[in-house]
Image: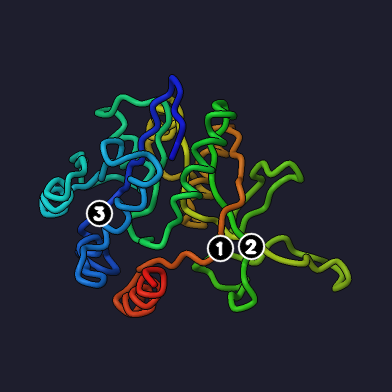
Amino acid sequence: MVCEGLMRTVVVIPARFSSSRYPGKPLVELLGRPMILWVADVAAKAVTAENVYVATEDQRIASVVTAAGYNAVMTSSNALTGTDRLAEAAEKIDADIYINVQGDEPLVDAGDIIKIADCKQANMDMVVNGFSWLSNLEDPANVNIPKVITTESNRLVYMSRTPLPGFKDAANKPEGYRKQVCIYAFTKEELERFARFGRKSVLEQSEDIEILRFLELETDVLMVETRPGSLAVDVPEDVAPVEAALRARQH
């Protein structure tokens, strides 16, 4: 559980019904329970249920969330990214730290949410984001996996869909690649600045990685290692393996 002290930490889960690849995705049932509630349940283990909010543009999602005892915040249908949706929600939520947890990753680890929140409390002048190392089963060339490049002190230099870091000589090939884990921590001011940019930055648009907008804002991003193994539901074909993983976790 997050030890808040004088700071209030909330988890805000962006949940868009009108997904182009999988409409209604937040409400898809996993083992008989809507996916968004699986994510909210994990978030509640980290920050307690009263500090969990779902930011959505659709009343169907809001109704499911509130019936389960969580908070729903209505946002517009034209948010450019999940972080823009979070910025809208933050205008209605009084907190010191806003943790963004993806609504399509029901296997997210509560301990990782706490780790990101604790790191943010110690680094209030930086955005905090998670990363993990690619497994041997993951292809660094897979464009669906954002690769993370940092300084040796784990400050973000860049993220890319291409395999980075590159190498000129095979002897200098990296021992492993790091990928983004979509747990973020922000202050309200950081979210306001992100939204005020008013558009996707050139690099953000090219890579389709929203955290890159903070580089345009000259905001430092601190990357924190989290546990590997989370699975996302991006398309209907992802449901079966995620359900299998949820079953395994219950036993």
For this rendering, which residue is in front, 59 or 144? 59
Residue in the picture at 21% in, 65% down: 33
Q: Secondary structure at mark 1?
A: loop
Q: CA distance from mark 3 to mark 2?
A: 28 Å
Question: At label 1, which amino acid type do we have?
Answer: Pro
Q: Nearer the viewer, mark 3 or mark 2?
A: 2
Determine the residue located farthest toward the top in the rendered image. Answer: 6
**Residue under circle 1?**
228
Using residue 124 as the reference point, say whether residue 26 is left or right of it: left
Q: Secondary structure at mark 3?
A: loop
Return the x and y of residue 136 as percentages of the image width and height: 64, 76
Q: Residues within 10 Å of mark 1 (few under 14, many from 20)?
A: some
Using residue 33 as the reference point, say whether residue 189 is left or right of it: right
Q: Residues within 10 Å of mark 2 (few under 14, many from 20)?
A: some
Q: CA distance from mark 1 to mark 3?
A: 25 Å
Question: At label 3, which amino acid type do we have?
Answer: Arg
**Disc 2 vs disc 1: Cβ atoms closer than 8 Å?**
yes
Residue in the picture at 31% in, 31% down: 90
Answer with mark 3 or mark 2, whichever residue precedes in sequence. Answer: 3
Question: At label 2, which amino acid type do we have?
Answer: Trp
Question: Residue 16, labelled with which disc?
Answer: 3
**Residue under circle 2?**
133
Q: CA distance from mark 2 to mark 1?
A: 7 Å
Residue in the picture at 85% in, 73% down: 170
Q: Nearer the viewer, mark 2 or mark 1?
A: 1
Answer with mark 1 or mark 3, whichever residue precedes in sequence. Answer: 3
